[in-house]
Amino acid sequence: MKSNLAVLSSDNKTIKFIEDNNINDLCYLYANSSRNIDNAQSFCNSNGFQKYYGSYEELINDDEIEFLINFLPTGIKFEYTYLALKKDKKIISNYPIISNKNELNAYKELIDLGLMSNLFLINDQDFEQFYSKCINKKYATYLLTLKQDQYNNLSSNDILFDLTPDLFFFINQYKEIKPTINSLVYKKNKITNRISYLSCLINFEDNRTLSVVLDNGDPKNSHHCEYFYSNSIISKEIVNKNDLFMFIQKKSFDNRSDFQYYPFKLFQEVLLNE
């Protein structure tokens, strides 16, 4: 029997994700929401949903909804993820879930309550790849630089917390051997207060060392290296699509949606002490 699916963000990115991955074969398109009720109604009529809401809170409180897709902007995504998980909804979302230190305690609460098994993080960035390539290596370097012609000093992206899920996944795999951050240098944008450059060494108790360099493409910075092309589009081909289907069909799967918590906390503690 199909479950009722709702979407928080009534936009083309969300409906394209549903269509590209045939989610409507597994779920009924039950409800959508928007802060603008006219937009919600138009999206509902255009895409075959049964009902619509003019607020995210109203949708989350609908007891007929079992699955919910949350592709809201990072700044507000965790708030509604938290509310929905506390209402026993199952959430499908994209990285990152948390965006600031104020969300850490509530995130830890969800972990302690065992609710993270109801959060499925789609892996459209192949965040396990860096760990797989460097597994059991004593020395590794993580280098992320954006092209200078992509640089936007008003960008809301934080090059550490928004663009490095593979780095966070790597650190999380070795959290039991107590990583420490040393030789930290970082720069924040004066307007957005987001990290725009960072370099550090991360040392682990077993003498493993990870060197990290992140550069958002500011013309004041310079590196001779290959460039990483960044975008925020939900990719058509997600790495863990089979796991996603198992999640929707309520079969067991290896859920790693909380991997970002420990590294996020680690960096926040170090940055706050600087």
Image (spheres, rainbow, N blue to C red):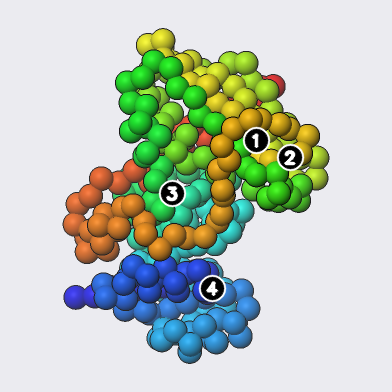
Where is residue 152 shown, x and y percent of the image?
Answer: 73, 50
Q: Residues within 10 Å of mark 2 (few under 14, many from 20)?
A: some
Q: Residue at x 41, y 42 (%)?
A: 127
- Asked if residue 272 shows in the view, the reply is no
Q: Picture coordinates of residue 21 (x, y %)? A: 34, 67
**Dot 1 corresponds to which residue?**
215
Q: Secondary structure at mark 3?
A: loop
The reply, left or right, for residue 108 in relation to residue 34 is: left
Of tags 4 and 1, the one toward the viewer is 1
Q: Which residue carries the number 3 mark?
A: 125
The label nearer to you, 3 versus 4, is 3
User: Residue at image x 59%, y 22%?
Assistant: 200
The amino acid pointed to by label 3 is: Gln
Contact between labelled residues 2 and 3, with CB atoms less than 8 Å apart: no
Real-space Cα separation, disc 3 to disc 4, in angstroms: 21 Å
Q: What residue is pinned by disc 2?
A: 218
Question: What kind of element bears circle 4?
Answer: loop
Q: Mark 1: which amino acid? A: Asp
Pointer 3: residues within 10 angstroms few (<14), some, or many (20+)? some
Q: Quadrant of residue 85?
A: bottom left
Residue closest to the far right: 190
